[in-house]
Image: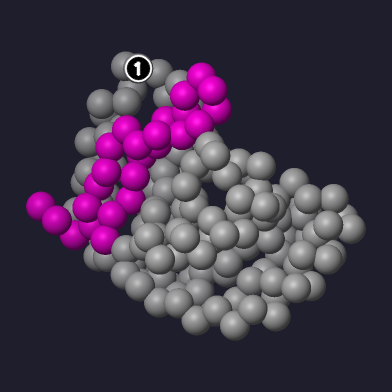
């Protein structure tokens, strides 16, 4: 089965992201706005209990993560994804590194760039127009996230929470 690890921001930030995602992200209906900590990977039914326990241990060893967003950015020319840029804090980077080390053979395709996607799979012309407008937005958002989630993918392509892990809690 396919799994992934994410953090969900506050409802306020999700609502703002969704105001763009409903128009510019074909994955809008498949998963809420999120910050990906570990991209999709495969685990068998027999492996999930052990993996979940390790995630619980990682969560206990990390403090809540400050989330600061100050601009819209893009991954172009690699791809036409537009996103809210999350400032990389040491708490966030250390948590992501520990999660990545947990499954060393499931290496992510890209380096970790913390972000919340608001548009993807756009044509080059669409990307240019939309990014030109959105990068002018004055975004100044800060919050603290105290949990991350192990998700699994359903047969219809949507993602749902398998388990939630609270940071810094015994």
**Residue 56 at what x, y percent from top left?**
22, 44
**Residue 104 at what x, y percent from top left?**
47, 39
Comparing 54 with 165, the one in front is 165
**Main secondary structure type of the part rendered in magenta:** strand
- The number of callouts visible is 1
Comparing 117 with 11, the one in front is 11
**Residue 25 at what x, y percent from top left?**
65, 48
The quadrant of the rendering that contains the N terminus is: top left
Residue 133 appears anywhere in the view: yes
Where does label 1 land, which residue? Answer: 45
Q: How has the structure been colored for display?
A: one colour
The span picked out in magenta is: 146-170
The correct choice, above or below, for 122 with respect to 46 in the image is below
Residue 152 is a magenta residue:
yes
Q: Which residue lies furthest to the left in this view?
A: 170
The 10 Å Cα crowd at callout 1, few under 14, some 14 to 19, many 20 or more, is: few
**Residue 6 shown left or right of residue 157 in the figure:** left
Residue 28 is a magenta residue:
no
**Residue 164 shown left or right of residue 128 in the figure:** left
User: Which residue is drawn at the image coordinates 60% and 76% (left, top)?
Assistant: 71
User: Which residue is drawn at the image coordinates 53% and 37% (left, top)?
Assistant: 30
User: Which residue is drawn at the image coordinates 57% and 69% (left, top)?
Assistant: 85
The correct choice, above or below, for 145 with respect to 159 in the image is below
**Residue 94 shown left or right of residue 27 in the figure:** left
């Amino acid at each position: 089965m396919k799994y992934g690890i994410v953090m969900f921001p506050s409802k306020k930030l999700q609502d703002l992201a969704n105001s763009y995602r409903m128009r510019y992200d074909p994955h809008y209906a498949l998963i809420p706005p999120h910050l990906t900590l570990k991209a999709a990977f495969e685990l068998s039914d027999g492996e999930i209990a052990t993996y979940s326990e390790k995630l619980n241990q990682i969560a206990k060893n990390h403090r809540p993560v400050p989330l600061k967003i100050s601009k819209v950015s893009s991954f172009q020319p690699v791809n036409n994804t537009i996103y809210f840029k999350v400032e990389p804090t040491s708490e966030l980077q250390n948590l992501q590194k520990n999660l990545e080390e947990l499954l060393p053979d499931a290496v992510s395709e890209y380096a970790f760039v913390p972000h919340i996607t608001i548009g993807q799979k756009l044509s080059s012309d669409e990307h240019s127009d939309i990014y030109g407008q959105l990068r002018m937005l004055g975004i100044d958002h800060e919050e603290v996230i105290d949990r991350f989630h192990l998700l699994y993918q359903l047969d219809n392509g949507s993602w749902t929470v398998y388990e939630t892990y609270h940071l810094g809690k015994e």
